[in-house]
Image (cartoon, rainbow, N blue to C red):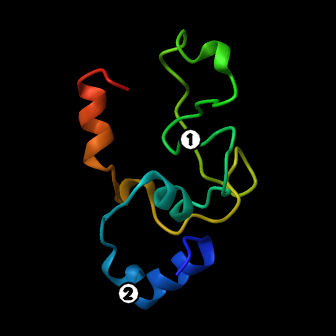
């Protein structure tokens, strides 16, 4: 099964996600698919903030990016309607651990 929006939607329907509303954990690609982001290299790839991946001149100078307020389809790299709520997503532990050690 390929990791695409339609397959994820079908998978959530098969496991009755609407009924149980489990919290989900996955890698960033899966999280992006579940939240309706367009596939591939995108300008605004973070689901938490509006980090501009193409603004290389600001990457090491700007520490705080504005928080993403909405996941409306058609705006800031959101292509589809989100399948899950952002509050139901658990972040993978490895990137969090690396960020605590200032490796990222």
Of the pair 76 and 61, the residue shown nearer to us: 61
Q: Give me the residue at 44% from left, 54% from top.
A: 86
Looking at the picture, how far across and down is residue 31, in whole percent? 47, 57
Q: Which residue is mark 2?
A: 15
The tag earlier along the polypeptide, 2 or 1, is 2
Q: Which residue is mark 1?
A: 69
Q: Give me the residue at 30% from left, 65% from top.
A: 23
Looking at the picture, how far across and down is residue 18, in whole percent? 41, 80
Of the pair 37 and 53, the residue shown nearer to us: 53
In the rendered view, would you say 33 is above or below 19? above
- Left or right: 79, with 66 as reference point: right
Q: Give me the residue at 57% from left, 64% from top.
A: 82
Q: Secondary structure at mark 1?
A: loop
Furthest-right residue in view?
Answer: 74
- Left or right: 10, with 81 as reference point: left
Q: Secondary structure at mark 2?
A: loop
- Left or right: 21, with 43 as reference point: left
- Give residue 5's quadrant in the image: bottom right
Looking at the picture, how far across and down is residue 98, in whole percent? 28, 32
């Amino acid at each position: 099964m390929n990791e695409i929006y339609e397959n994820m939607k079908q998978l959530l329907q098969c496991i009755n996600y609407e009924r149980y509303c489990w919290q989900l954990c996955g890698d960033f690609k899966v999280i992006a698919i579940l939240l309706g982001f367009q596939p591939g290299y995108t300008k605004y790839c973070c689901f938490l903030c509006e980090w501009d991946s193409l603004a290389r001149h600001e990457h090491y100078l700007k520490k705080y990016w504005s928080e993403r307020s909405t996941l409306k389809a058609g705006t800031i790299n959101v292509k589809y309607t989100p399948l899950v709520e952002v509050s139901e997503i658990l972040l993978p532990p490895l990137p969090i651990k690396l960020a605590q050690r200032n490796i990222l």
